[in-house]
Amino acid sequence: MSDRVRDLVRQRRIDPRTDAVSVRQAALDVIAEHESRSLTGAVRSLDEPELVIGQIVADVSGFGPLQQFLDDDTVEEIWINDPSRVFIARGGRHELTSLILTAEQVRELVERMLSSSGRRLDISQPFVDAMLPGGHRLHVVLDGISRGFAAVNIRKFVARAHSLTDLVALGTLDEQSAAFLDASVAAGLNIVVSGGTQAGKTTLLNCLAASIPGSQRLVSVEEVFELQCGHPDWVAMQTRQAGLEGTGEISLRVLVKEALRMRPSRIIVGEVRAAECLDLLLALNAGLPGMASIHANSARQALVKLCTLPLLAGDNIGSRFVVPTVASSVDIVVHTGIDDDGSRAVREIVAVTGRVENDLIESEPVYVRRAGRLERGHGVPLRRDAYEQVGVDLDDVLGVGRWGP
């Protein structure tokens, strides 16, 4: 019946990628025709026509057998190790599904996913990062690089939080630390979000961006669109692969430089992984407030990594320049993690003091999670004047004299 629906979609000139409603109507028409024929005994009546309709729509307009997981808001990630081993992550835990595909189905699914992204996958380009129509992130490794079959990952952006207040409700932050971060964003401090894979860095970055005043212009750059902050004055840019001729690539370094020409009040780099870290530091050091995320095991390790990545920009870039630049550019590091039960929580918030000892940047804990709750540390952000300029009493926000030092 899927083939009959495809024929009908072609006859009616329906774009299945953008008009799922019309595809569903075509499926309804085909099912109605089938049920009408069943009255004559020509075919067997369907036991669950609604289920069949859903499967047909997923097959024609969606992503076939995987659509059920894409529609399930509790599923965070889907990956295919080989056609007979399809996994999902739910609540931070991995599950092997009962779904069994064929190699041909996987190839067809990958082709369909990439068809709307403008990105390609071939022998010369065996890896691809792309965004699916639903805002999910696709990563594929071509067969030959991965063993036996193409390796497919779909990371869903399940937006359970859109603001710092939402993170408080989820237990990721408490009210005091959320108020501090909200004030820090309003004051224009430079904030780095660190954590491991699936630790909630992008969600936290989105919630921090929601605290940026609406009167300011935001420009974000990412490898693949993931940020969804909904700021009223926001331009989002993503990288581009090289074409078949090996030209036309747009790297993250290029995007950071271009962002500075767009009169931004703030800049966000979705994730720094390599030499683009140098361009971000130069922008922050020039007085442009910004935020970024980075993979790291702790806030201190994030600072070490921020000092290491710029060295990839060239032999003429040395630690004698980079380390003090990081110390003077980054104000706050927020480190988030995922617990054994799958819950995500901010583990620590540290303030960078600006001091450097033996090539190590000093930092002080503002909040540290102990026994499941964030406790006030002794750290205080260096740029107190930035808070004063936006009318924020930093001592009051930190609870000086009430909860801690």
Image (tube, grey):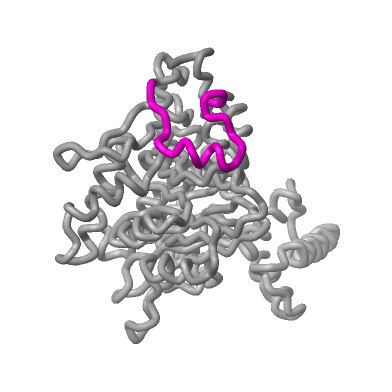
Residue situated in front as seen by the camera: 358 or 150: 358
Quick check: 111 above or below 230? Answer: below
Quick check: 207 above or below 16? Answer: above
- Horizontal side of residue 228 vs 84, given as left or right: right
Residue situated in front as seen by the camera: 117 or 185: 185
Residue situated in front as seen by the camera: 183 or 297: 183
Q: Magenta stretch: residue 389 in it?
A: yes
- Please name the residue shown 32% across and 72% down the image: 125
* One can see residue 83 in this view: no
Q: Magenta stretch: residue 175 in it?
A: no
Residue 324 is situated, as x and y percent measured from the top left of the image, at: 25, 48
Residue 179 is situated, as x and y percent measured from the top left of the image, at: 57, 30
The residue sitting at the bottom extreme is 245
- Please name the residue shown 45% across and 42% down the image: 201
- Please name the residue shown 45% across and 54% down the image: 270
Q: Where is residue 25, by image quadrant? A: bottom right
Instruction: Give the magenta range.
Output: 378-397
Residue 190 is situated, as x and y percent measured from the top left of the image, at: 44, 46
The quarter of the image holding the C terminus is top left
* One can see residue 66 in this view: yes
- Horizontal side of residue 226 vs 350, given as left or right: right
Quick check: 206 above or below 116? Answer: above
- Please name the residue shown 37% across and 39% down the image: 195
- In this rendering, the count of numbered labels is 0
Residue 151 is situated, as x and y percent measured from the top left of the image, at: 36, 56
Residue situated in front as seen by the camera: 354 or 50: 354
The quarter of the image holding the N terminus is bottom right
